[in-house]
Amino acid sequence: KAGVTQTPRYLIKTRGQQVTLSCSPISGHRSVSWYQQTPGQGLQFLFEYFSETQRNKGNFPGRFSGRQFSNSRSEMNVSTLELGDSALYLCASSLGAKEDEQYFGPGTRLTVT
Amino acid sequence: AQSVTQLDSQVPVFEEAPVELRCNYSSSVSVYLFWYVQYPNQGLQLLLKYLSGSTLVKGINGFEAEFNKSQTSFHLRKPSVHISDTAEYFCAVSERGQAGTALIFGKGTTLSVSS
């Protein structure tokens, strides 16, 4: 079956702009989680959506938001971009139980200049 | 609050040698434990997980890990590594009583296998 896809794969934005990243989960998966990966902070949990509802949220400012559609596809939005938002953004999908394997996409590399 | 410490940021080894990547976690409640691998320019792939039961867990690609509750550790081992095992390895925990599937990751260990 097709894996988790993320678009775009690479993105360059200017400080102050906003950006939207997209994640298409594996068919049948209802949970989508987002993570930020940076060399300094490592992998940090942003938020999780399950059946169109945000189920959990990490410690990120309100500039980071997301949503999930009825087909389980998810988008993540970052407003008023800062240089420190440059990172690899990964999404992961699963059936939704904590014990279930999470399948990660290849990520979107965001560079803020 | 949970935290995960991967004790070695880089581990260089020769091909066919054994390797152990160390992971300690801190949590006041029961957790699930995971090891993921990340190859260059790719997402993460699950190697193995501990949910309950036997403390020795076997995963893909010949890796195994042992859960030690008293030492709050979950070290990853492989008896004989290959060049293709060169990658970044992440230990992660998930708190059992908390809703959702959020994972807390360690900072990662870079495994470099040379011939």
Image (spheres, rainbow, N blue to C red):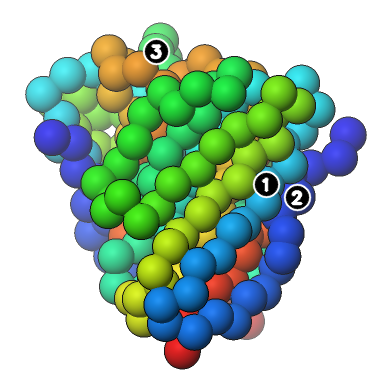
Mark 1: few, some, or many residues within 10 Å (few <14, many ≥20)? many
Subunit that carries the residue with mark 1: A
- Residue at mark 3: chain: B
- Residue A101: name its quadrant: top right
Q: How many labels does the image show?
A: 3
Q: Which chain carries label 2?
A: A
Q: Which of marks 3 and 2 is in front?
A: 2
Residue A23: which disc?
1
| Of residues B17 and B113, the one drawn nearer to the viewer in this rendering | B113
Circle 3/circle 2 CB separation < 8 Å: no
User: Which residue ends up furthest to the bottom in the rendered image?
Assistant: A113
For badge 2, the amino acid type reads Thr
Q: Which residue is drawn at 67% across and 47% down?
A: A23
Task: Tell me: residue A33, above or below residue A79.
Answer: above
* SS assignment at label 2: strand
On the image, which quarter does residue A50 sit in?
A: top right
Viewer-closest of A58 and B52: A58
At 51% from the left and 29% from the top, the residue drawn is A49
The residue at which mark 2 appears reads as A5
Contact, CB < 8 Å: mark 2 with mark 1?
yes
User: Residue B13, position in %: x, y?
Assistant: 47, 73
Q: Position of residue B57 (x, y in %)?
A: 48, 27
Cα–Cα gap, marks 3 and 2? 31 Å
Q: Are marks 3 and 1 in contact (CB under 8 Å)?
A: no
Say whether residue B44 is visible. Answer: yes
